[in-house]
Image (cartoon, helix red, strand yellow):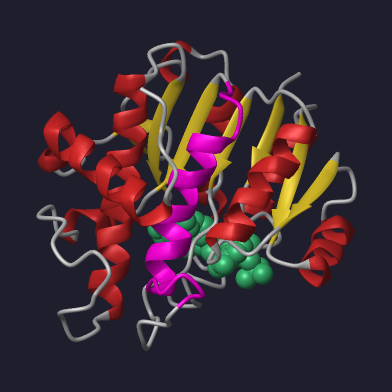
Amino acid sequence: MARVFITGSSDGLGKMAAELLIEQGHSVVLHARNESRAKDAKKAVAQAEDVVVGDLSSIKQTRNVAEQVNRLGDFDAVIHNAGAGYREPERGDTEDGLPRVFAVNTIAPYVLTALIKRPKRLVYLSSGLHQQGDPSLRDLLWNDRAWQGQQAYSDTKLHDVLLAFAVARRWPDVLSNAVEPGWVATKMGGPNASDDLDQGHRTQAWLAVSEDRAAQVTGEYFYHMRQRTPKAATRDSSLQEKFLSECGKISGVELEV
Ligand SMILES: NC(=O)c1ccc[n+]([C@@H]2O[C@H](COP(=O)([O-])OP(=O)(O)OC[C@H]3O[C@@H](n4cnc5c(N)ncnc54)[C@H](OP(=O)(O)O)[C@@H]3O)[C@@H](O)[C@H]2O)c1
């Protein structure tokens, strides 16, 4: 039995992955943005071990989420699943002055990775849209460009792959991989999504716990339990390091070498 922490598990793929893992006999700690959503999550996934609370658009609250997780002890796996979508109509200044999508999708997984005691496995939710992400890392905070929600989302999903691969390289004792769940009909995906919802949550759960040899790899990108080729730039270790350095400057949190 493994112990798994899943961010953004009050709904969508995170909640579905939690249900699947519990059904398989694993212990799952959920995460919700506030007390009200935590209540909903507890009700929906009644057999979860616990629920950690914090809004990932706030660096302060994200640090607090890491503290809550560390107080619960060791985890075998952490799934960085929480995400803000590609239809954000505006930059959405957070309390830290960041675009909301960037804060939730890029900075939060970076800060949680740096501050949660290292698990054996890390899984990061990316998207096929990462292929359209901007590898120059210019204007990460959208100060100089007119806002484009889908481009901003695609950039953050590229960041998630860079983060997964950087961690895989820096921490060889941890299995760290990225996942593309497909375009599926969750709250984020919307009703017109064309991929199979029943496949959407399985890969993240499998990478977190499976004893299959295919799941025990590191620094890879998966779609429906198979490796898929990510954007070539994600393999560039100097770009990965530049990305970590930018996240360090923005968040004030360092990722251990
Ligand atoms: N659905 C797709 O087609 C698709 C495609 C590619 C990639 N993905 C990725 O898959 C992951 C899961 O997406 P999903 O489709 O399951 O989306 P979803 O149904 O919208 O669920 C997102 C989860 O993240 C939580 N969350 C969002 N902002 C948060 C914040 N500021 N603080 C704390 N929690 C927050 C949500 O909480 P609330 O329930 O309170 O809103 C919810 O639990 C995301 O990383 C997404 O980028 C999804």
* Residue 196 appears in the picture as rendered: no
Main SS of the magenta segment?
helix
Q: Is residue 84 magenta?
A: no
Q: Is residue 118 magenta?
A: yes
Residue at 30% across, 31% down: 165
Q: Position of residue 174 (x, y in %)?
A: 46, 18
Decide: is 184 above or below 30.
below
Q: Position of residue 61 (x, y in %)?
A: 63, 59
Residue at 42% across, 81% down: 93
Quadrant position of the N terminus in the picture = top right
Q: Looking at the image, in which quadrant does ligand 1 appear?
A: bottom right
Q: Quadrant of residue 3?
A: top right
* Residue 133 appears in the picture as rendered: yes
Q: Quadrant of residue 250?
A: bottom left
- Magenta residues, start to end: 94-119
Decide: is 192 above or below 253.
below
Q: Position of residue 88 (x, y in %)?
A: 40, 81
Q: Position of residue 100 (x, y in %)?
A: 44, 73
Quadrant position of the C terminus in the picture = top left
Residue at 80% across, 33% down: 72
Relative to 154, 124 lies left or right: right
